[in-house]
Image (cartoon, grey):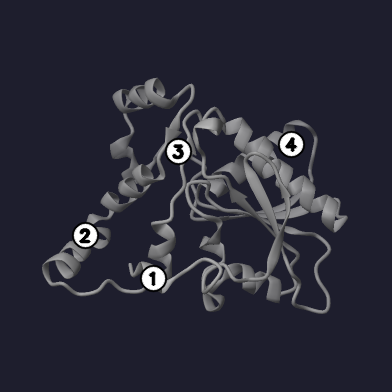
Amino acid sequence: TQEAAFEVGRNLAVTPGEVVFENELIQLIQYQATTPQVAKRPLVMIPPCINKYYILDLQPENSFVAHAVGAGQTVFMVSWRNIDAAHAHFTWDDYLEKGVLVAQRIAREIAKSDRVNALGFCVGGTLLGAAPAVLAAKKDDTVASATFLTRMLDFSQPGQLGVFIDEPSVAAREAAIGRGGVMPGTQMDFVFSILRANDLVWPYVVNNYLRGTRPAAFDLLHWNADGTNLAGPM
């Protein structure tokens, strides 16, 4: 995509808000209300931890955050840390405890609400699917509703991703980063691109490299190329 066409804070992720909480794994953003009345029960959005949060807040005309705020929702958003070596020990449980669950708790406290509505996208939705199960084991029903977008909960049939999942490849990952280490975001980008090579690889080789044409200005592809690192154990 045209890198200069988009910039976070200029024409991407421009819905007004502020960071109201942070820890070693997340920042929690609360967006400013734009309606005279707002819902008391907050909506907490959990984006994928392998990408930046602004998939849900692209340009103003296709920002889901702006839509939700405009509909009177009290909106909070998790922004995940881009993992480095100092935080490469985080596990799945850390992403739940320090990420999803703490975000829901802080949102409830700020909104003075006893429950939250939650929304999860991609692997953020997978984490969100695990969170109410953990809470249910503790007799906690503070999640009033959960909405899932393009996510997997049942991995017994992983679809095309199954081509990358077998015992040798899993063993290699566990040996390399299972107890600590970083999985680079560029590796995830590569995997998803080659799953749809006819759409996401070859047209750009032909049009940009062979024909010399400029790539399209596409906000979603700009976001897709702005990946984040993941803690190996997670």
How far apart, in angstroms, are the residues tagged by discs 4 and 3? 21 Å
Residues at discs 2 and 3 in contact (Cβ within 8 Å):
no
Q: Position of residue 168 (x, y in %)?
A: 29, 23
Which one is closest to the eye, mark 4 or mark 1?
1
Disc 4 residue type?
Ala
- Whichever of labels 4 and 1 marks the residue nearer the N terminus, that label is 1
Q: Position of residue 28 (x, y in %)?
A: 69, 52
Residues at discs 1 and 3 in contact (Cβ within 8 Å):
no
Residues at discs 4 and 3 in contact (Cβ within 8 Å):
no
Q: Is residue 7 above or below residue 23?
A: below
Disc 2 residue type?
Asn
Q: Is residue 65 above or below residue 107?
A: below
Question: Of 229 and 127, which appears nearest the observer?
Answer: 229
Q: What SS does tag 4 mark? A: helix
Residue at which label 3 appears = 155
Q: Position of residue 98 (x, y in %)?
A: 67, 38
Hey, which quadrant is residue 9 in on the image? Answer: bottom right
Q: Residue at x 32, y 45 (%)?
A: 191
- Whichever of labels 1 and 3 marks the residue nearer the N terminus, that label is 1
How far apart, in angstroms, are the residues tagged by discs 4 and 1? 46 Å
- Local crowd size for mark 1, using a 10 Å CA cut-off: few (<14), some (14–19), many (≥20): few
Q: Residue at x 38, y 24 (%)?
A: 176
Residue at which label 4 appears = 136
- Local crowd size for mark 3, using a 10 Å CA cut-off: few (<14), some (14–19), many (≥20): few
Residue at which label 2 appears = 198
Disc 1 residue type?
Ala
Residue 65, visible in the rendered structure: yes
Disc 3 residue type?
Phe
Residue at which label 1 appears = 4
Left or right, 90 with respect to 41, comes to left
